[in-house]
Amino acid sequence: MSKKRVFISFDFDQDKALRDLLIGQSRNSICPFEVIDNSLHEAAPENDWEEKAGQLINRADLMIVLVGAQTHRAHGVLKEVNLARKHHKKIVQIIGHKDGPYKRVPGAGALYRWTWDNLKKILC
């Protein structure tokens, strides 16, 4: 079975560690997905930022939004979710911090707890 190609969307300023954890998990040989790319840093966006993000998202089988305390307000995440919807990509949200505050990202699909079983269910 081939691995699903995943684009990770996350709040670059707040949740880079979550992204690193998910990438680390994807390197497990039994993991059902591979990360093809992740959020572009929007603090100093290039003129063609949205075009580049759209191309990366289009190459993915689905998008995982890592949900932290401020993800629902992150402009880059909101733009990436809109791009994924435009490209008809499946989007799921994974709660990044077990006990931390979080709020779902509008229009970003179902919300799941970050467990190995949930990742397998989402990606198989």
Image (cartoon, grey):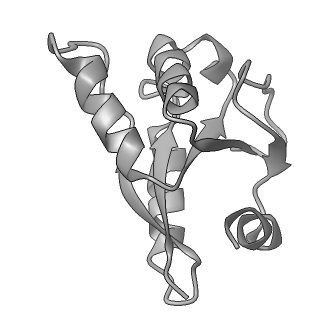
Name the quarter where the C terminus is drawn: bottom right
Percent position of residue 34, x then y: 44, 68
Compared with 99, 29 (above or below) is below
Q: Nearer the viewer, residue 73 or 56?
A: 56
Please state if 7 lies on the left or on the right of 99 as rendered: left
Q: Horizontally, is 72 left or right of 37 in the view? A: right
Q: Is any part of residue 38 visible from this angle?
A: no
Is residue 108 in sight in this rendering? Answer: yes
The residue located at (57%, 80%) in the rendering is 31
Instruction: Name the residue located 62 percent from the left edge and 23 percent from the top edge.
Output: 71
Pinpoint residue 86: horizontal percent, then vertical percent: 52, 25
Q: Is residue 50 left or right of residue 96?
A: left
Residue 124 position (above or below residue 10):
below
Q: Quadrant of residue 57?
A: top left
Which is nearer the eye, 86 or 64?
86
Picture residue at 22% right of the left edge, 14% below the top: 45
**Residue 32, above or below 61:** below
Extreme residue in the left direction? 47
Tell me the residue at 76%/35% (across/down): 109
Q: Quadrant of residue 115?
A: bottom right
Q: Where does the N terminus fall, quadrant-wise?
A: bottom right
Question: Picture coordinates of residue 61 (x, y %)?
Answer: 51, 56
Q: Nearer the viewer, residue 1 or 37?
A: 1
Residue 66 image point, x, y percent:
62, 40
